[in-house]
Amino acid sequence: MNINISFNKLVKENWGILLFTVVLFASRSSFADWYVVPTGSMLPTIVEGDRIFVDKMAYRLEVPFTDIEIMQTGQPKRGDIVVFNSEKAGNRLIKRLIGEPGDRVAMFDNKLIINGEPILYEDNKNTLRKTEYLGNVAHLVQFIPVAEARDNFAEVIVPQGHYLVLGDNRNNSADSRYYGFVPAIEIQGKANKVLVSLDPENYSLPRKERFNKPLI
């Protein structure tokens, strides 16, 4: 009896904190989240140590703590940077969406061909980087020569309910070239901006120039 009284008293005295905690975790589950970038697979767009804001309502609204969809709010589009739970990789990943359902995608010498049309690339002052144009989305991609780069693949057709994704660091990214197409249900949200960035190679000191930086 005393235990019950103590527990009830504890809940009563701390209900505000408990409510805040529940709301916080429910919000992370359904509305917004953050992603800590552990690798350089999205260089130069995203760097190791970036803390990314993920809009989990960009494509659908779900019941908190479940994968049950309440309503669809949008469709992933070519050029979006998406965060997804990859069952095949056994990890949470962040990549750029290249192919939508029904698209025909090929790569020759690190250059994309989508639906029979070569994607435009523009040289950059940095010889290892180019500007890639995916429709209205112009962004930098990086090409660093490595021994086993998968810089060519024959044309594939993206199945319905799936997407083809690549890292912006094209020669150093484990993406659809390794794990195949990403099921729509695995996509958690759209990466919109860098909230905070800490440099893992410099005592985790803040990179203030990257704070609140929009992602393109």
Image: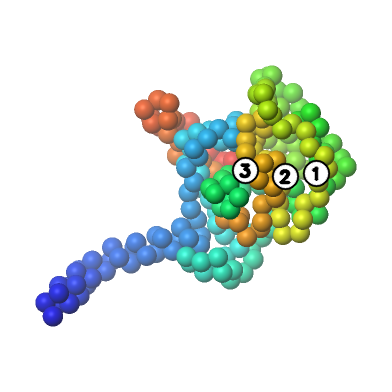
Q: Nearer the viewer, mark 1 or mark 2?
A: 1
Q: CA distance from mark 2 to mark 3?
A: 9 Å
Q: Taking the image as drawn, is residue 88 in sight?
A: yes
Q: Amino acid at mark 2?
A: Ile
Q: Sequence order check: which comes first, mark 1 or mark 2?
A: 2
Q: Position of residue 96 (x, y in %)?
A: 65, 43
Which image quadrant: the N terminus?
Answer: bottom left
Q: How crowded is the residue under tag 2: few (<14 C-alpha within 10 Å), some, or many (20+)? A: many
- The image quarter containing residue 188 is bottom right
Q: Which mark is residue 105?
A: 1
Helix, strand or loop under label 3 = strand
Residue receiving disc 3: 95
Determine whether 93 is above or below 138 in the image: below
Residue receiving disc 2: 98
Q: Sequence order check: which comes first, mark 3 or mark 1?
A: 3
> Which residue shows up at 81% across the image and 32% down it?
108
Q: Position of residue 38 (x, y in %)?
A: 49, 38
- The image quarter containing residue 179 is top right
Q: How crowded is the residue under tag 1: few (<14 C-alpha within 10 Å), some, or many (20+)? A: many
Which image quadrant: the C terminus?
Answer: top right
Helix, strand or loop under label 2 = strand
Disc 1 and disc 2 in contact, CB within 8 angstroms: yes
Report how many numbered discs are placed on residues in the image.
3
Q: Amino acid at mark 1?
A: Val
Residue 14 lies left or right of residue 150; in this view the side is left
